[in-house]
Image (spheres, rainbow, N blue to C red):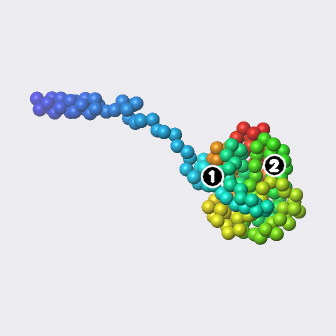
Amino acid sequence: MRVYVVKGMMILLLVALVGCAATPDQAAGPTPVPTAPPVGVKVGNTAPDLRLANLEGKEVRLGDLRGQPVLVNFWAVWCGFCRVELPEMQAVYEAYNDKGFVILAVDVQEEKPLVQDFVNELGLTFPVLLDTKGEVTRSYRVRGLPTSYFVDPNGVIVGVQVGPIDEAWMKEHLAQVGVK
C-alpha cells in the first residue's frame, strides 16, 4: 500500500510541476526590441566613428557618410603592401564612386608633406585622412598595415582584412551591400 501512495504522490507532484510550466510562448518572454549592433571593430559591429582632417585640412567624419558604403583603409607611405593596394583602390573608387562608394584612406602618423607627395605620385583622388597622433588607429585596434574595414550603408562592418586588399575583395563587399 505504501508503494502506491508514494507513486501517487510522485504522480501528483509531476502533474503539478508540468501544469505550472510556462507555455512555449510564455517561456520566450516578451519580444525583444531590436537594438543597433554594438560599436566595435569586428564584422557585425557598428564601426567606431572617426573624425580626422583630410589633406586640405577639412574635417571628415565617418558618421556623415551613413547611407553609403565606405572602405576605411589604414596605411602608411613606408608600407610596401599599401603601395600595391592603393592603385587598385583608386581603380575601384573611380568605377563605383558615382554609385555612392567612398574610400577613407587613413594615413597612420606621418607628416602631411610626405603623405601629399605620395598621394600626388600615385594620383589618388579619394579622401586621404591624417591620423597624426594614431588615436583613430588605436580605436580601430589596427595591429598591422594595411588594414581595411568595409562598412555598409548602415554603418555596420561587413568585412575586415589585415593585409593588402585587391579589386576582387572590394567588389565582393560592394556586391554584398547591393552596389553593382
Mark 2 or mark 1: name the one nearer the start of the chain: 1
**Residue 62 position within the rendered picture, expressed as x and y whole percent measured from the top left:** 68, 53
**Residue 25 position within the rendered picture, expressed as x and y whole percent measured from the top left:** 40, 30
**Residue 103 position within the rendered picture, expressed as x and y whole percent measured from the top left:** 76, 52
Identify the disc placed on residue 95: none
Nearer to the camera, 115 or 15: 115
Residue at image mark 1? 47
At x 84%, y 57%, the residue is: 124
- Is 87 left or right of 1, judged from the image as shown? right
Tell me if mark 1 has few (under 14), some (14-19) or many (20+) residues whose alpha carbon lies within 10 angstroms of its own: many
Q: Decide if residue 148 is in sight here.
A: no
* Amino acid type at image mark 1: Ala
Q: Splitting the image into 4 quarters, where does residue 52 fall?
A: bottom right
Q: Splitting the image into 4 quarters, where does residue 139 fall?
A: bottom right
Residue at image mark 2? 93
- Is 87 left or right of 43, judged from the image as shown? right
Helix or strand or loop: what does disc 1 sit on? loop
